[in-house]
Image (cartoon, rainbow, N blue to C red):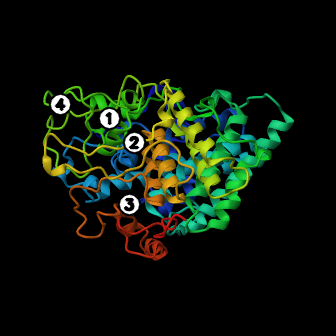
Amino acid sequence: MKTQYMIRNGYKYALSAFLALTVLTFAGCKKDFEKYNTDNTGIGNGKFQIGLVYPGIQASVFGGEGDYQLNQNLNADCYSGYMMSPNPFRGNINNLNYSLVDGWNQNIFVTSYTNSLFAINSIGKAGTRTTLPDFWAIALILKVEIMNRVTDKFGPIAYSAAGKTLMGTPYDAQQAVYKQFFLELDTAVTNLNTYIKANPAQTPFKQYDLVYGGDYTKWLKFANSLRLRLAMHIVKVDAATAQAQAQKALDPASGGVLTVNADNAGISGGGTHNPLEVITTSWTDIALGAPIETYLVGYKDPRLPVYATPAADTRFAGQYKGIRIGSIVTAKPGYNGYSLLNSKTIITSNSPMMMMTAAEVWFLKAEAALRGWTGAGDAQTNYNTGIQTSLAQWNVANGDYVNDATSLPIAYVDPGNAANNSPAVSTITIKWDGGAANEQKLERIITQKWIAMFPEGQEAWTEYRRTGYPKLFPVVTNNSNGTIDSKIQIRRLAFPQNEYSTNGPEIAKAVQLLNGPDNGGTRLWWDVNKANF
């Protein structure tokens, strides 16, 4: 891990428009919320001045390698089963064996609020809501995308009141946060539909857009697809709202959802780069996880050589070998010879950082069809299309993969330490089985969805917590002092300690909203301990 947080030249200009917003940590800025949420950025209300802020906000969804490593890579990317670090951080006492590192996890608050939410608030205060409703729609979509990542890590968060109080900032229950997400997406979809109807083919946002080159029809599809994703998150805790929101997303009148790879919502250009490339190759801080190895090898999945490199360790060179989460890794280069993410394909410096893909949406539709929701289509068709769309995304041959009814995930063998070995944890096959029970159909859908979303670990971790799929190896070493159950695995991150010292009364209320202790074993609002059907 490195401590520098680099800003590439390509989007320095975009961040400079709200530099004053990024000098504080969230925990230390409670008393300055009003100061930092007035229009002191000089962005004015012109299209050019407002537009300058957007590249920085888009880049901040994932951030540079330093922020990304702390905000996602050393939590969700590994908790999802995608990755594991060969670096024995803090003497093997860290997030990856459930000894949560407060300093690491506090960074999520710092960057999400100062680099993102406060900048979006500033855009709103500059009058964009009414003078540039199309630009405001993009701001709202980004706001939901960014802050959903925060609430799905912690639970209750400061959202509706962020920036509005001088003394302490109230937290919202996660249910209330999700309700506001849906309302903000309502506004975004209405604004974009209205603009597109009145100004067909115009692209005023083009020069500021790191996602779609100013194409509002694609931003509209992303907004609807994001609504569908969020709706599915809450299906076990509020089935009626989940169905209503999903059907709204799937209504053709809303503007459609992502369906082809040209629709994929990836951040690139403007000087941004894929942080996983540096973390993997230069820092040698991340490697392939054991679960993704055992599924892809067992399935003879053609995406495997695109996703990962063969091991370099001479004991098993040429094989694909991941590392099991919670392993006691030895000092570098001990585990450095295990498989890495492929820096020539999936994580080149210029590879887009994917917020959402069409393949994911097809699997969301497959689950929606399984649940009988209007507009979802046929579950089997959606499932097969999801697989085919993912294969096409990486330019690998489809072959007869979707019809493979025999291949199974394999057992995990760690050549470096047999104590980490485990038998296979799943017997799910690839080919759709129309006669299977809904639970087995769901495992098949989520397992293939998980494979298709690689390497975007945030959503993969959320779906694992929501459904229990794909089945993953439990953590080898659990240093949570009994607060996290190894069988069900980590459910959230604890609130930063700085919140207790600077926002004490409000964080105490936030813990009450959790309905459990502030540790990694407490379930979030949507993470309900009951069957999927």
- Which comes before the other along the chain, label 4 or label 3? 4
Compute the Cα span from label 3 to label 1: 22 Å
Type of residue at label 2?
A: Tyr
Farthest residue to the right: give it.
198
| Residue 325 visible somewhere in the drawing | yes
* Residue 443, x across and y down, in percent: 47, 53
Q: Residue at x 62, y 66 (%)?
A: 239
Residue 499 drawn at (x, y percent): 40, 65
Of the numbered discs in the image, which one, if any, rests on residue 316? 4
Q: Earlier in the sequence, mark 4 or mark 2?
A: 2
- First reached walking from the N terminus: tag 1 or tag 4: 1
Residue 68's label in the rendered image is: 2
- Which residue matches tag 1? 279
Measured Cα–Cα span from mark 1 to mark 4: 23 Å
| Disc 3: which residue | 493
Residue at x 53% of width, y 69% of height: 170
**Which of 438/49 is in front?**
438
Disc 1 marks a residue whose amino acid type is Ile
In what element is the residue under mark 1? helix
Amino acid of disc 3: Leu
Residue contact between numbered discs 2 and 1, judged by CB atoms under 8 Å: yes
Callout 3–callout 1 Cβ contact below 8 Å: no
Disc 4 from disc 2: Cα separation? 31 Å
The residue closer to the viewer here, 270 or 177, is: 177
**Label 4 near label 1: C-beta < 8 Å?**
no
